[in-house]
Structures are given as structure tokens and as C-alpha cells.
Amino acid sequence: MTGPRSLVVAATILSILLAGACGQDYYDTVVAKRVEQLSAQDEADRAHAAWSLGQIGPRASAAVPALAKALSDPSAEVRSAVAEALAQVGDASAAAVPALVTALRDEDAAVRAHSATALGVVGAPAASVAVSDLIGTLRDGDSTVRLYSAWALGEIGSEAKAADEALASAMEDDNADVRRWSAEALLKVRGIEIDKPR
């Protein structure tokens, strides 16, 4: 990638790296600028702003309301970047749960997958309201959406008990990864600890 846009990306990465040595005030300034850019006229600028907020992570929690609003952006590329950013921001994205639940019905598979991921990151109790919707996306036509829906239900854990039967059915999915993640999620939903290899 060359040209002006590559310079913008390089400058953003540099500012994020430099921010590691700075306090929250610096982050607040950067976040405010990126939130403003979420309303830019250019689609690529809006997507880049969302990407930047995701790279900042939990320190971008003040951007959650703006990111939630941006989940209705007319551009699928922007909506996907926004949903991914909400996953990277972490627990603070609990305030965006209603918008993320709506985004599970987005026409774009990447938006649906990232939204499921963000709901899993938020976890219980805030994302518990999404259980029935995630059960629905376990039957999505896109295997990545099904996979992350299963993962999200596992992260919600025992508060996703209503998904027990759906996860058991998903263990017969055509996709091996969906089958594996559904099996792991089912164990978590049932409160069974999974021994991970060391």
C-alpha cells in the first residue's frame, strides 16, 4: 500500500505505539479524534477510524456509544470494522449489546461474525440477552458465523443453558471447526471444565 492513505495508517500505528508510554489523557485525545472520524464522508476513513479504535482496545471504552451507533453505517466494510473494534474494546462494549444483537441479522457475514465475537467477549451477564439470537445464528449459512456464535454461547456460559439443544445439534455441523467449538461451548454451558493441553 502506497500513497497518502498508507501514510495515514503508518501515522496511526505510530501514535498507538507511542501511546503505550503515555497516560489515559493521551488516549482520550486520540479516541475523541477517531470518534469524530466515524462520521467522515469517506467510507475508507470511517472504516479506518473504527480499526484504530479497535487497536487502542479497552482504553477506547469512551468510544463505545459512537461505535454502537456506527453499526448502522451504510457501508458493510465500516460495520464489520466497527463490530470487530467492539470485540477488541472488551467488557466496556456491554453498552453496545442491543446494537450487536441487531447486527447479528446484518446482510454481511463478516458483520454477523464480528458481532457474535463481540457478544462473546462481553459475556455474562450483559450478553445473556443475546442467547436466543445466537442460537439463531448457529444455523447461519456462513460457517464462520456459526463458529463464532458457538464460541460466544460458550463464553456466556451457564447463562446460555437455553442453547444446550442447539449446541448439541451443531456438533453435527458439516464444518469440523463448528463441531469442535460447539462441543467446547456445550461443556461450558453445562459447567463442565475443559482440560487444555499444557
Image: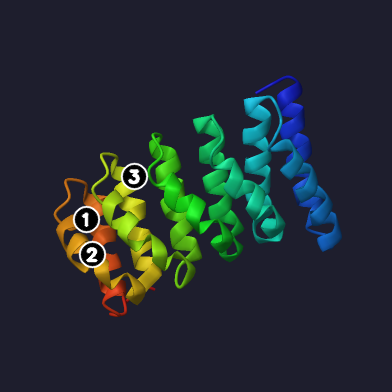
- Residue hosting label 3: 144
Q: Between disc 3 and disc 1, whose residue precedes? A: 3
Q: Secondary structure at mark 1?
A: helix
- Residue hosting label 1: 179
Q: Between disc 3 and disc 2, whose residue precedes? A: 3
In space, the residues marked 1 and 2 are separated at their CA atoms by: 6 Å
- Residue hosting label 2: 183
* Rendered residue at 53%/32% (across/down): 77
Task: State yes or no: discs 1 and 2 in contact (Cβ < 8 Å).
Answer: yes
In space, the residues marked 3 and 1 are separated at their CA atoms by: 12 Å
Residue 197 visible, this angle:
no
The 10 Å Cα crowd at callout 1, few under 14, some 14 to 19, many 20 or more, is many
* Rendered residue at 81%/51% (across/down): 18
- Tell me the quadrant of the picture where the N terminus can be found: top right
Vertical placement of 24 versus 104: above or below?
below
Q: Quadrant of residue 90?
A: bottom right
- Residue 70 placed where, x, y %? 60, 41
Which amino acid is tagged 1?
A: Arg
**Which labelled disc corresponds to residue 58?**
none
* Rendered residue at 71%/60% (across/down): 59
Camera-side residue: 173 or 41? 41
Marker count (numbered): 3
Camera-side residue: 144 or 45? 45
- Residue 102 placed where, x, y %? 44, 48
